[in-house]
Each structure stands twice: as structure tokens, then as C-alpha cells.
Amino acid sequence: EAGVAQSPRYKIIEKRQSVAFWCNPISGHATLYWYQQILGQGPKLLIQFQNNGVVDDSQLPKDRFSAERLKGVDSTLKIQPAKLEDSAVYLCASSRRPAWGETQYFGPGTRLLVL
Amino acid sequence: TQLLEQSPQFLSIQEGENLTVYCNSSSVFSSLQWYRQEPGEGPVLLVTVVTGGEVKKLKRLTFQFGDARKDSSLHITAAQPGDTGLYLCAQETSGSRLTFGEGTQLTVNP
């Protein structure tokens, strides 16, 4: 079974530029998550999707971050415009459903450096 | 959302040594998960503990959940270089949302 795929793996941009990340979850997984992991910290949930609907985006900085999962499969996360403090690893995870005890499977992440 | 405190933040040991890392909270955990994250990869689930006092073993790794369900520990016996990584604890809240601690960065030197 293929794991969670993410691209690109690395991205370097200048502040105020835009950037987009892509995630393809494990086949059949209805729930998709985006996390931000700043160096030296644990991952922080940005947004959770159930199929193509948003379940929780309470920690998403909506003035600059947006995410979509239009067909309920793959997802994109966009930052526009980027700030220096957005430098982090952006992790995508998926699970079969948003039920208690369901395992989340993480992708390798996209490492973003904002200069 | 309760904060999860992990200690130590960094740990560097020699191959063959034993070690313990900790995860604590001021509030009761409903359940607790331990993950390992290797460089350049996402976190991988090691174990979930649910019941107070529960002990789970995974080869050389022993996970313990405190009786009051406010703390947990991970003990590694005879550490190997392959154990190197970031060890994260996480609490699951409603809707399967995970809140992670800051992690313990473990380095096992050959």
C-alpha cells in the first residue's frame, strides 16, 4: 500500500512570494490533515478535512494560508504572501476516518525556507 | 487545549545504554500516543496507551502510562544507532485531532 505522498520535498522562496504544497493521501482515507512543524517543535494542526469538507481550521492563519480538497482526494495548501516565520516543515497526514483511535499516517513533509 | 511537556529536550547517549524520556500534562489524558520521527520523514506511530497504569512493550521499547493518566514514559533498553530520532508524545482530542509535545531529540552514538 502506497503511503502519503507530498511534493515538493523542498522549497526556498523569498518573503512576500506565494507557495503551494500538494498532498495525495493513502487510497480510501477520508480524513486528511495538514500540520506545520517549526524546527525544534512538535507538529501543529493547521486544518482537517473530512472528504472535501473542512472539519477544523481553527489554527489556520486565514489571512495568508488557504487549503482545499475539492474532489475529496488530494489536497493543496497555499501560503500567500509568505513571511519569514512560515519557515517550517509542512506535513500531510491521512486516516480512514475521524474516529477515536484511528491511526494517522504521515507523509515525508515539505521543507519550506522563506528568505 | 492542554500542553504536553516532554523531557529531556535533547539526549545523546552511547550505543548499549538505557534511557527514559517523559511526557507530562497538568490535565488527565484520554489517551496518549508515542511517535518517532526520523530526519526527513514524518512521524510514525509507535504505540497508543489508554488505561491508567498500562504498560506496553515493543521489542526494546517499554511504554508506561501513569496511574492518574497525567504522565507517560518511554524506556529504551540497550539503545542502538537506529533508535536515533525525535520522540513525540501526542494527545488525541475530539474528531481525532492530535496535539503534540515538543519532542525529545535522541542521538545514539555508535
Image (spheres, rainbow, N blue to C red):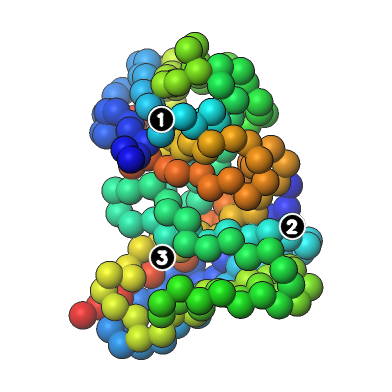
Residue toward you, A74 or B10: A74
Measured in 3D between alpha carbons, the distance from the residue under mark 2 to the one under mark 1, in whole angstroms, is 29 Å
Residue toward you, B68 or A77: B68
Q: What residue type is labelled 2?
A: Ser
Same-subunit check for callouts 2 and 1: no
- Using the image, tell me which numbered label, if any, was put on residue A27: 1
Marks 3, 1: nearer the viewer: 1
Residue B24 is situated, as x and y percent measured from the top left of the image, at 66, 67
Same-subunit check for callouts 3 and 2: yes
On what subunit does the disc labeled 3 rest?
A: B
Pointer 3 or 2: first along the chain? 2
On what subunit does the disc labeled 1 rest?
A: A
Mark 1 is surrounded, within 10 Å at the Cα level, by few (under 14), some (14 to 19) or many (20 or more) other residues, namely some
Residue toward you, B94 or B12: B94
The quadrant in which the N terminus of chain A is found is top left
Residue B53 is situated, as x and y percent measured from the top left of the image, at 71, 77
Q: Is residue A78 above or below residue B62?
A: above
Q: Mark 3 points at which residue?
A: B105
Mark 3 is surrounded, within 10 Å at the Cα level, by few (under 14), some (14 to 19) or many (20 or more) other residues, namely many
Marks 2, 1: nearer the viewer: 1
Q: In this view, does B89 lie above or below A47?
A: below
- The picture quadrant where one finds residue A44 is top right
**Residue drawn at the location 48% of the way across and 36% of the way down:** A94
Q: In this view, does A95 lie above or below B80?
A: above
**Residue drawn at the location 63% of the way across and 31% of the way down:** A59
**Residue drawn at the location 29% of the way across and 78% of the way down:** B80
Q: Name the residue under label 2.
A: B30
SS of the residue under disc 2: loop
Q: Which amino acid does label 1 sit on?
A: Ser
Residue A29 is situated, as x and y percent measured from the top left of the image, at 49, 32
On what subunit does the disc labeled 2 rest?
A: B
